[in-house]
Amino acid sequence: MKVAIIGAGIVGASAAYHLSRRADTEVILIDKDQQGKATLAGAGIICPWVSHVENPDWYRLAKEGAKFYPELVRHLEEDGESGTSYKRVGALCVSDRQEELDRIEEAVRAKKGEAPELGEVLRLDAKETRRRFPPLNEELESVFVSGAARIDGRLLREAMVRAAGKNGARIVEGEASLVSDGDRLTGVAAAGEVIDANQVIITAGAWVPDLLEPLGVRVNVQPQRGQILHIDMQDEDTSDWPVILPQSTHYMLAFDDSRVVAGATRETGSGFDYRQTVGGVHEVAGEALRIAPGLSEGTLKEVRIGFRPMGEDSLPLLGKLDEPRQVIVATGLGPSGLTMGPYVGYLAACLAMGEETGMDLSVYHPLRGASVNG
Ligand code: FAD
């Protein structure tokens, strides 16, 4: 079986990695160098149990996505890739309102039976909350969820691509396009050659509609710009600082190198407009300082910009097309792609191999609410 994968973000890298672990599969992973790749800008919070998204089909994938990580990290280590950066640092859901914290605590505890991987749930006073993340506003108390993790999407993506390469996958740099003969897909063109794959997995993030358009297939995916700040906290040891989840779409997390990441804008309708805007930086810095005034002396090192692939609802687009049959689409992971991406990539790999996934995926079908041939 020969499988071509178009797009090496977190979803495509995972699909390629999982296929490369099989002896019976020839894998070709194609990726184009361009600005705004979501995986390279993503914050890296993995904590689906406290999300505001109410949709049970979203939660199912997000929960399985978070649960999938430890095994993935173990497999990568076996393949010589130990630098994924995955770490269970826990998350502090912060608020200055007791009723809000009561509600969060109750909701997370209710999920624990079905999701023991979320770990311990603790109620922390303001002093203990601030001890764990010193820059925080001293008014904030928290609910701590110990199973929450963080990941640097860049490092994980690189680790999976490298491991796939070591397992024999061919990595091609360049823009891919689908080659068809009427309704029939005959191959994938990239870097001056046409690859005649049995199956094609399209994991091109927000760019998926451009790839499918020549086949007359329309999927509802739009780019949503996210701007996110990277702050250097000089000599602070931030390696164990937890993820901070205020009750909004803004958040913070830390990495080993004295770095705090504060995110992010959600700019629906941005198109592929790759720009750092004054309004975007102002919004994110303002929210971050309201929650954590102690960040104000940090050095603003970098503003990353990525285009989240957004479907028309909160659900990913995942499934095999009816026409042409050998195309699998996996995109639309929106703001949760680093949580779900490795698992969704694995599911896409199973679909390519015609294997049972153990999950009813019909609700995620890529053409729900869209049209074929116009
Ligand atoms: P991408 O990473 O965009 O990858 C698509 C790839 O396809 C790219 O490399 C692109 O170059 C390639 N491509 C496109 N067209 C072609 C072509 N024709 N030929 C070849 N290659 C092509 N998620 C979380 O779970 N937790 C978070 O904390 C979090 N924070 C985020 C913060 C920000 C600011 C942003 C922007 C996103 C965040 N996300 C988070 C969401 C997550 O980053 C995305 O959902 C996820 O990275 C999407 O991955 P992808 O592989 O679908 O797309």
Image (tube, rainbow, N blue to C red):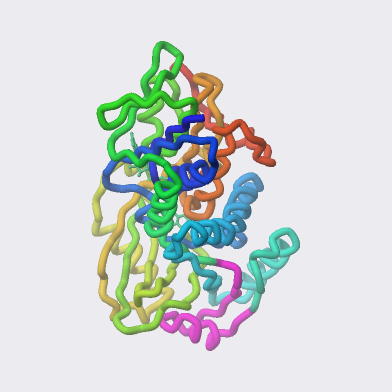
Q: Is residue 354 left or right of residue 7?
A: right
Residue 34 visible to the viewer: yes
Locate residue 255 relative to residue 277 in the image: left or right: right
Occupied quadrant, residue 159: bottom left
- Residue 132 in percent (x, y) is at 50, 82
Q: Is residue 89 above or below residue 42?
A: below
Would you place residue 219 above or below residue 120 in this image?
Answer: above
Is residue 77 within the magenta segment?
no
The span shown in magenta is 123-148
Q: Does residue 131 show up magenta in the picture?
A: yes
The residue drawn where x is 63% and y is 47% is 55
Residue 163 or 199: which is nearer the viewer?
163
Q: Quadrant of residue 69?
A: bottom right
Task: Check the image and report above or below for 225 versus 312.
Answer: below
| Near-viewer residue (312 or 198) | 198
Identify which residue, 9 or 281, lies in the foreground.
Answer: 9
Answer yes or no: is residue 222 visible.
no
Up/down of 262 relative to 236, above or below: above
Number of labelled discs?
0
| Residue 272 x %, y % | 30, 41
**Quadrant occupied by the C terminus:** top left
Frontmost residue, 104 versus 65: 65
**Residue that lies at the very extreme toward the right in this rendered image:** 113
Residue 146, how many percent across, how many down? 60, 72
Identify the residue at image location x=59%, y=55%: 68
Q: Is residue 121 left or right of residue 134?
A: right
Please tell me which residue is depicted at 35% across the width and 30% down the height of the picture. 210
Where does residue 229 sit, x and y in percent of width and height?
32, 64
Instruction: Identify the residue at the far top of this view.
Output: 182
